[in-house]
Image (cartoon, rainbow, N blue to C red):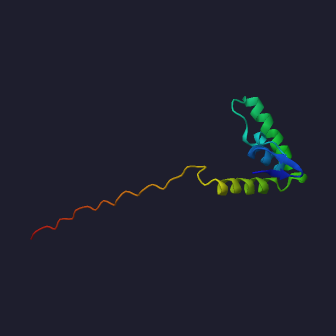
Amino acid sequence: MKYIVAGHQAVSDAEFAELALGTPVELWLGVEGESDEERAARLDAARDILADPEYGSLPDDLIRLAARVVDENPDLFNVVPLARPARRRSARRGVAA
């Protein structure tokens, strides 16, 4: 499927998200193996972006994007309902008089 956002063609879901949101996905999710210093800098940059009035709707956009991804990929979390264990009934025995 082709994704075209603002005249640019996205070739992957990550690129689509980056074009749609105007920021790289890694800014929000981080990258494997990042140092504490890199993480702090990334989170600081993210806070600056969220504080910018131009990106005022970004949190809502992120929530909508996440909801869409979950909706389109129902097996994403591979959640299966667990069977409830049968209720144990204690045997009540009457006392003979």
Image quadrant in which you'd find residue 32:
top right
Instruction: Find residue 29 and report its horizontal and vertical position in percent.
Output: 72, 41
Indicate left or right for 86 with 13 as reference. left
Extreme residue toward the bottom, this view: 97
The residue at 80%/34% (across/down) is: 41
Residue at x-position 83% and y-position 44% = 23
Q: Is residue 28 left or right of residue 6?
A: left
Measured as percent of width and height from the top left, residue 38 is found at 77, 31
Residue drawn at 83 percent across, 40 percent down? 45
Relative height, residue 59 to residue 41 (above, below): below
Taking depth in this image into account, of 31 and 17 the one nearest to the observer is 17
Q: Quadrant of the C terminus?
A: bottom left
- Residue at horizontal 78 percent and vertical 57 percent from the top: 60
Q: Nearer the viewer, residue 10 or 14?
A: 10
Q: Using the image, determine if residue 94 lies above or below residue 79.
A: below
Seen as rendered, the residue at the extreme front is 1
The correct choice, above or below, for 35 with respect to 80 in the image is above
Q: Taking 38 as reference, is 89 left or right?
A: left
Looking at this rendering, what residue extends furthest in the left direction? 97
Whole-percent x and y of residue 26? 76, 39
Query: At which x and y percent is residue 96?
Result: 10, 69
Labels in figure, total:
0
